[in-house]
Amino acid sequence: MRAWAMRNLGITGDFDVLPTIGSKELVAWLPTFLEAKSVIYPEIAYPTYLVGAAIAGAEHRAVGISAATWPKSELAWVNSPSNPTGRVHTRDEMRAAIDYARRENAVVASDECYISFSAGEAVPTSIFHESDGDNRNLLAVHSLSKRSNLAGYRAAFIVGDPALISRIREIRKHAGLMVPLPVQQAMTVALQDEVHVEQQAALYRARREVLRPALLSAGFRIDESQAGLYIWCTRNESDWDSVRWFAERGVLVTPGNFYGAAGSQHIRIAMTATDTHIASVAARISAGI
Ligand SMILES: Cc1ncc(COP(=O)(O)O)c(C=O)c1O
């Protein structure tokens, strides 16, 4: 994990790593481990950031992308590439999040579990690519569920500030949240290979290109969707109307309001079905039947 983080995230300076039982449990429990009293997260976001704050009984607030506008908090979540929008932070946006961590003495946790799946010109970078070796108050969350298709193994890890990780490790140990050794060994093997990850990324890129023209021809506009494994699109109608339109064609998509009220005119399409299914869905969307 250490070698992978140096190779792939560009991390320098003092840092530590810690395996977790998938990244969802870490996302859900991090505010509790940190005893955070206030948590902020993106206004269109993976719902577990909010769930974790609620478990900890912390105040929580959804915020915009620009860290310059964030209110004071003890824990701030960043998610690039984003689930559900596929938006990729610019390097300046990442630097602004780091500045926030230093200015407010807040922990910034960067959920980077889709970092391997770039789809265009916006290449996702880790928060540690921008931290210049000063990793205090910074954590990055990585998961093998996406990059190596190992969701069933519950294999993930965090990287970052050694003092924070030591504290989190201590609590986790006493709560029994240890990753079984065979899973850790499988992670070590999977992290040594990037060929299968590039193959997976190529699959998502190809599926995106199959779906894109079909969606445009049916009147949808694709927003963000620069990376990751989702397409975020809208027809300027209620998300549930779009969900119904897809359901009538035998396709299950997710209403954007699951990720926050700001998503209520969008839907999220996951490109996790097989190539054959994706081709068939694209044909049905284009035909409008
Ligand atoms: C942004 C984000 N973070 C974390 C997770 C959790 O993934 P896992 O628990 O499989 O590592 C997901 C899963 O969809 C996600 O979309």
Image (cartoon, rainbow, N blue to C red):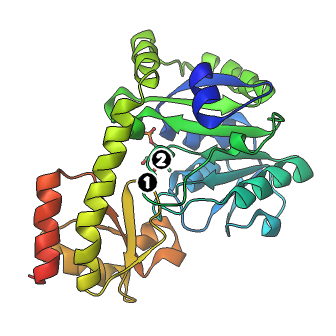
Please indicate whether residue 57 sits to the left or right of residue 80 in the image. right
Query: Does 42 sit above or below residue 273?
Result: below
Category of crowding for the residue at label 2, using alpha-carbon neighbours closer than 10 angstroms: few (below 14), some (14–19), many (at least 20) = many
Query: Does 87 sit above or below residue 286?
Result: above
Picture quadrant where residue 33 is located: top right
Task: In the displayed orientation, state which residue is furthest to the right.
Answer: 103
Q: Is residue 153 visible?
A: yes
Which residue does the image show at 47% across and 63% down from the upper left? Answer: 226
Which residue does the image show at 41% across and 38% down from the upper left? Answer: 147
Element type where label 2 sits in the image: loop
Element type where label 1 sits in the image: loop
- Quadrant of the image for the C terminus? bottom left
Q: Is mark 2 within 8 Å of ligand 1?
A: yes
In percent of width and height, residue 156 lies at 49, 30
Q: Which mark is residue 114?
A: 2
| Residues marked 2 and 1 touching at CB (< 8 Å) | yes
Q: Is mark 1 within 8 Å of ligand 1?
A: no
Which residue does the image show at 83% across and 55% down from the upper left? Answer: 100
In percent of width and height, residue 222 lies at 39, 76
Q: CA distance from mark 2 to mark 1?
A: 5 Å
Please indicate whether residue 91 sits to the left or right of residue 251 in the image. right
For the residue pair 59 and 264, the one nearer the viewer reads as: 264
Q: Amino acid at mark 1?
A: Gly
In percent of width and height, residue 38 lies at 76, 54
In percent of width and height, residue 35 lies at 75, 39
| Disc nearer the start of the sequence (2/1) | 2
Q: Which mark is residue 228?
A: 1
Q: Amino acid at mark 2?
A: Tyr
- Quadrant of the image for the N terminus? top right
Which residue does the image show at 56% across and 43% down from the upper left? Answer: 28
Q: Which mark is residue 238?
A: none
